[in-house]
Image (cartoon, helix red, strand yellow):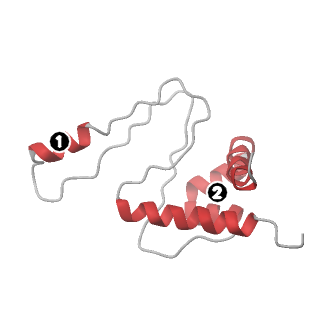
Amino acid sequence: MSDRQDLFTAHYRTLRRDAAARRRLVENPIEGLKEHFGSIPDGDYRIEVVPQEPDTITIVLPAPQPNGEPTAADIDAVSRRIYDMLFTDGIGGYLIPEEALTWVLRDMRSRWAAAAAPKQGD
């Protein structure tokens, strides 16, 4: 496993084992991520954490339609992106609702991985 994967795996392990760290991340995701990774890119976005609970079905809704009723094309696009994650224990990941945020997440992960990488000569 690469150092980069170890960094993210370690974060998920911490969140599964440390109730206080998990609570801090849920209550204030940006500060919780900064606490573990050291930084987070600036930008006009929010981060929300939805913790998995053993007795709860979590529903992620598509973004609201800004201009009234959705068109047939809108419904078609959304219906092609319905995913059920069944019978999972400890699933984790990121839901990225728009293309621009893909780059924000990429920047976050790259920054975190670079900070965790051993320096030359270490």
What is the x, y in percent for residue 39?
Answer: 64, 71
- Residue with the mark numbered 2: 24
- The crowd level at tag 1 (other Cα within 10 Å; few <14, some 14-19, many 20+) is few
**Horizontal side, residue 22 vs residue 97: left or right:** right
- Label 1, on which residue? 75
Amino acid carrying label 2: it is Arg
Which label's residue is closer to the chain start, 1 or 2?
2
Q: Residue placed at 54% from the left, 73% from the top? A: 41
| Residue 38: image location, x then y, percent | 69, 69
Specify the amino acid type for callout 1.
Ile
Position of 113 with respect to 79 (left or right) is: right
Measuring from the top left, give residue 56's x and y in whole percent: 49, 30
Q: Is residue 90 left or right of residue 102?
A: right
Looking at the rendering, in which quadrant would you find the C terminus? Answer: bottom right
The single residue placed furthest to the front in the displayed view is: 121
Secondary structure beneath dot 1 equals: helix
Q: Is residue 111 visible?
A: yes
Say which quarter of the image contains residue 111.
bottom right
